[in-house]
Amino acid sequence: MDLSYEQLSEAQARMFRLVALNPGPELSTEAAAHVAAADQQHTEQRLQELVRAHLVEAGAVWGRWRVHDLVRVYAGERAGEEPTTADDITRLLLYYLERATRADGYVIDLTEPTPRGYPDRTQALAWLDAERDNLLAAAVLAESTGHADIARDLPMVLENYLSTRGHPEEWRASAELAVRAARTLGDERGEARARVSLSDALRELNAHSEAIAEARRAAETFRGLGDRPGEGMALRALALGLGAAGQHEESLRMSEQAVPLLRQGSNRHVAAVALMNYGSHLADVERYSEAIDALVESLAVLSQTSKSVKALGLLSLGWALDSAGRRAEAISSFQESIACALEVGGLWETDTAARASASLGELFAEDEQSDQASFYLRQGAALFAKASNNSLAAEALKVLGLTLIALEERREEARSSEFTSPAHERHYEQAADALAEAIALTRHTAETTTDDVRQELADLLISLSIPLVHLGRSDRALEAIREALAILRRLADEDPQAHQPPLAAALDTFAWALAQDDTQLPAALEAASEAVEIATGLAQHSPDEHGELLQDTLERKAGLLDELA
């Protein structure tokens, strides 16, 4: 490496050292040009020369460059011998801070003030996606090189991006870094602001007690500084943390205090978001009329400031309207939420559209409008999958499957027969298809994450067996139930109290499926007897909770005994 380095011109050697200064895996031509104070054309020429010298490698896409880890170490040693290194690091860090600050204005589709610096939102988000690793590493580099102000500010600039793009772990780590940096600077307000961000990140990670503690600490600091809007911001985070922890009355009280405090500030968008949250908290405690009023008032502002958050507000309004019994208005609100979210088109907005679609599907299912229910539930599942939320995609497909099964079962009861006519087989086919898709997504979740989805998988397999039996595919139905029973038996061994009830219900379904074949009646009776035995033990300890399960299993067993007799 010494030999290669000594063959470089002064300009090439400087560019080599600059590439190695970058804390992330790759450096863009634009960033290198900025640090080198050169135009991009000459910068790219120098970088190409370094590639030919085998000191720099082309990145994954055109316009990006990287160095091997050992070469980076060598370049760092050479850079440490140069007096300009500290200034170069400062320019690099400032470049990332300035560019990220401009991009932040596009993240949640803010329309006031109008963001600048990128041609459009798509390109701003693309830059953030491409530079994410560099930006996170730059914050760490800033802390380690004495640039505490940048280490404090850069994580706050990335907050909206990391939260809406689904990077909660990185969000938490960068917020913790900002807290340390603000403390190093003796900046109480900055530390409190970073703790608010940390609280929000912890809530996303379901660390509710920690989230609540951070928000309380931030609120106390802001209160001591006499910063009313800051205190409101912290109370908003505290309300959300309390709500996520199920403490809805306390959550509502904090949210109610946050709104007037934030209205004292100059940012009407933030105040409107707090009012939207307040409306949701009112709905949580079933004060639906007040919730609707608050949400409508917040939407008057959000309609002017952010389509992204407007879509979320419309979703919350739809839920409140439906709970208040205003079904037609709820449907309209959900539909407007979907249209608004899809118009913006980001990952976060796609998730909002998915939730609104799934909610619409459930409303139409309740009204037995199967075609519309199928359309919106399938749309919701597709959007959840697009937003990389396979668990909710599977849930939407499960609701679709169960809706279609329930529809056909009601029709069969009305006909006083279990005969499935060709005209209605379509619904059972659709139900089986939806549940099979949900099972595939759940298996994928089990393979790619650490989430324990065994109970969900067992439930789906049991549900799948029902349309399969009606369609005359008993072998596949029994195969699905046997897999579910194997899962449930293992779960019941681990936690009997939690998993014996679904095991008994699954055995009851198994008995029903076996009984469709007269030759399987003895096996069906055996399954039904086991279900009764489990249900009896459960009902002895909790008769109110498990009495219905016991009654169902006893009726199944009695019916089978009659058939065998």
Image: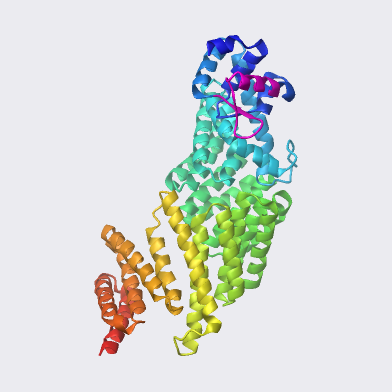
Q: Residue at x 54, y 40 (%)?
A: 197
Q: Residue 110 lies in magenta, yes or no?
A: no
Q: Residue at x 62, y 60 (%)?
A: 315
Q: Position of residue 372 (x, y in %)?
A: 62, 72
**Quadrant showing the C terminus:** bottom left
Q: Is residue 290 visible?
A: no
In-front residue for pair 23/469? 469
Q: Position of residue 483 (x, y in %)?
A: 35, 65
Q: Residue furthest front?
A: 52
Q: Residue at x 34, y 79 (%)?
A: 552
Compared to 32, does 281 lie above or below? Answer: below
Number of numbered discs: 0
Compared to 178, does 12 lie above or below? Answer: above
Q: Residue 54 lies in magenta, yes or no?
A: yes
Residue stretch in magenta: 44-67
Q: Residue at x 67, y 67 (%)?
A: 332
Compared to 72, does 435 lie above or below? Answer: below
Q: In the visual, does 160 lie left or right of 177? A: right
Compared to 93, does 322 lie above or below? Answer: below
Q: Position of residue 465 (x, y in %)?
A: 41, 72
Picture quadrant where residue 231 is located: top right
Q: Is residue 473 visible?
A: yes
In-front residue for pair 437/414? 437
Q: Position of residue 95 (x, y in %)?
A: 66, 27
Q: In the visual, does 356 lie left or right of 535? A: right
Colour convention of the picture: rainbow
